[in-house]
Each structure stands twice: as structure tokens, then as C-alpha cells.
Amino acid sequence: MSQEIIEHEQKDLTKNWVSSSRFLFYLQIFCILSFVLGGCYRMYNQRYPGKPKVEVQSSSKFTPEYK
């Protein structure tokens, strides 16, 4: 009976701080990694599309052209 209780306590996260700390460490790594990758994916989808083709008046160019 006592052997069964000891085995159960070793598997329990509240009793075995080594297992619980390892689990929490990997959980933190997973959460941070998922937030970083999610942020990178969001930034990639919302990226700047490039320079738009803007029509500039001919009178306001560096060398203006008048009619």
C-alpha cells in the first residue's frame, strides 16, 4: 500500500516539484514561442505592400514642366 502511495505522489504535480517545475518550464517555452511565432505571422500578413504608384503634378516636380 505504501509503495502505491509513493508512486502516486511521484506522478502528482503538486507533490513532486521537480516534475512540476519541468512541466511549467516547457509550458512557458511553448507559450513564449507561440506568441513570438504568432506575432511574426501577423506582421508578415500585415506587411507594407510597397511603394504605391502616385501621380505627381508636372508643375511640382524637381524640374517643373509648365503648359
Image (tube, rainbow, N blue to C red):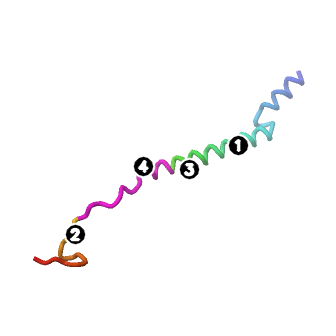
Q: Earlier in the sequence, mark 4 or mark 1?
A: 1
Which residue position is annotated with label 1?
A: 24
- Residue 21 in percent (x, y) is at 75, 43
Crowdedness near tag 3: few (<14), some (14–19) or many (≥20) residues, C-alpha within 10 Å: few
Residue shown at the point (22%, 69%) measured from the top left: 56
| Residues marked 3 and 4 touching at CB (< 8 Å) | no
* Residue 29 vertical position relative to residue 67 in the rendered view, above or below: above
- Residue 1 in percent (x, y) is at 88, 21
| Residues marked 2 and 1 touching at CB (< 8 Å) | no
Crowdedness near tag 2: few (<14), some (14–19) or many (≥20) residues, C-alpha within 10 Å: few
Crowdedness near tag 4: few (<14), some (14–19) or many (≥20) residues, C-alpha within 10 Å: few
Q: Earlier in the sequence, mark 4 or mark 2?
A: 4
Q: CA distance from mark 1 to mark 3?
A: 18 Å
Q: CA distance from mark 2 to mark 1?
A: 58 Å
Residue 36 disc label = 3
Which residue position is annotated with label 4?
A: 45
Q: Of circles 2 and 1, which is in front?
A: 2
3 or 55, nearer to the observer: 55
* Residue 64 vertical position relative to residue 26 in the rendered view, above or below: below
Disc 2 on helix, strand or loop? loop
Query: Amino acid type of disc 4?
Result: Asn
Q: Of circles 4 and 2, which is in front?
A: 2
- Residue 65 in percent (x, y) is at 16, 77
Q: Quadrant of the C terminus?
A: bottom left
Query: Amino acid type of disc 3?
Result: Val
Residue shown at the point (60%, 46%) measured from the top left: 33
Q: In which quarter of the view is residue 16 placed? A: top right
Residue range in magenta is: 40-54
Residue 56 disc label = 2
Q: CA distance from mark 4 to mark 1?
A: 31 Å
* Residue 52 vertical position relative to residue 29 in the rendered view, above or below: below
| Tally of numbered discs | 4
